Each structure stands twice: as structure tokens, then as C-alpha cells.
């Protein structure tokens, strides 16, 4: 599994859990992504090690000056988890109704990034200076 298929599955997972209104699936995904981002133990690299293959990320990237010694995919995982959880909590726990758009938009955008191999948020993080 490369990062492109991982993004597609994460987007599909978000949309499925939103459609069926499964709070624990959103919280579990966010916790899993924060764990991956903080420890750099990624599901994609673990599956590649088990299968004894090496795959490219499959995502469009460009070279910029590295200002931070943190991988862009790690920062992306933490950022997505924080924004998804905070918007979901504000929506369901505190009834901030105008935030219903953010989790749905994130699900479609992440799934679209997996399908098209272009993630604007990841490209922005790399432009800022993440590896």
C-alpha cells in the first residue's frame, strides 16, 4: 500500500463514518493518525516491510528548501487528525451547526487526493518547509 491508496482509504473511511454517524470511528481514526504522525510508524511502510517491497508515495511533490526536520506526511497526519476531531467535537458536542461542512469536505478532499495523486494540503506543507 502506498500513500496514495492510504489517502483514498482514509477519505472513504471518514465519509462512511460520517454517513452512518459513527463517532467512535472518527475518534479512532484521529487517534490512529496522531499515533502515526508522532511516532512515524506508518501503516503504509509497515505493510511494505511485511511484503518486502518498496513503493513510491504516488503523490505529486516538488522540491523546496527543508526548513523543518519533520516529514510532510507526518505533519499532514497530525494536522488532519486535529482539524477533523476539533470540528467534529464542536459540531456534535457543542452544537456549532455551521461546522458540518468541514468533516465532509475533508473526507471528499482526502479521497480526491488519493484518486488524483495531488494533495493540496501536503503540497502546502512541503512549500512551508517540511520534508
Image (cartoon, rainbow, N blue to C red):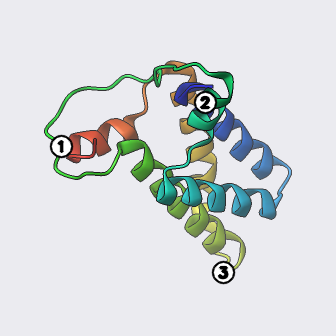
Task: State left or right for residue 86 relative to residue 72.
Answer: right
Near mark 2 (Cα within 10 A), the count class, few <14, some 14-19 or many ≥20, is few
Q: Rounded to the nearest whole Å, what is the CA distance between mark 3 and mark 1?
A: 39 Å
Q: Regarding mark 3 in the picture, which secondary structure is present there?
A: loop
Residue closest to the eye, 69 or 11:
69
Image quadrant holding the C terminus, namely top left
Image quadrant holding the N terminus, namely top right
Task: State left or right for residue 73 relative to residue 106.
Answer: left
Residue closest to the eye, 43 or 52:
52
Q: Regarding mark 2 in the picture, which secondary structure is present there?
A: helix
Viewer-nearest of labels 1 and 2?
A: 2
Label placed on residue 94: 3
Mark sitting earlier along the chain (3/1):
1
Viewer-nearest of labels 3 and 1?
A: 1
Q: Position of residue 18 (x, y in %)?
A: 76, 51
Q: Rounded to the nearest whole Å, what is the CA distance between mark 2 and mark 3?
A: 43 Å
Check the image and report above or below for 81 versus 10.
below
Label placed on residue 66: 1
Q: Position of residue 71 (x, y in %)?
A: 35, 45
Near mark 1 (Cα within 10 A), the count class, few <14, some 14-19 or many ≥20, is some
Q: Kindly identify the residue that appears in the image at 67 percent across and 23 percent down.
A: 51
Q: Position of residue 67 (x, y in %)?
A: 16, 50
Q: Kindly identify the residue that appears in the image at 32 percent across and 51 percent down.
A: 70
Q: Quadrant of residue 87?
A: bottom right
Residue to which mark 2 is pinned: 49
Near mark 3 (Cα within 10 A), the count class, few <14, some 14-19 or many ≥20, is few
Mark sitting earlier along the chain (1/2):
2
Amino acid at each position: 500500500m502506498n500513500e496514495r491508496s492510504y489517502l483514498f482509504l482514509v477519505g472513504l473511511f471518514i465519509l462512511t463514518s460520517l454517513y452512518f454517524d459513527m463517532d467512535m470511528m472518527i475518534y479512532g481514526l484521529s487517534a490512529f493518525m496522531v499515533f502515526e504522525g508522532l511516532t512515524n510508524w506508518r501503516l503504509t511502510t509497515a505493510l511494505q516491510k511485511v511484503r518486502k517491497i518498496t513503493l513510491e508515495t504516488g503523490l505529486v511533490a516538488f522540491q523546496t528548501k527543508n526548513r523543518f526536520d519533520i516529514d510532510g506526511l507526518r505533519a499532514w497526519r497530525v494536522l488532519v487528525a486535529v482539524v477533523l476531531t476539533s470540528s467534529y467535537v464542536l459540531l456534535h458536542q457543542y452544537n456549532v451547526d455551521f461546522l458540518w461542512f468541514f468533516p465532509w469536505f475533508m473526507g471528499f478532499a482526502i479521497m480526491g487526493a488519493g484518486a488524483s495523486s495531488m494533495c493540496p494540503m501536503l503540497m502546502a506543507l512541503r512549500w512551508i518547509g517540511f520534508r
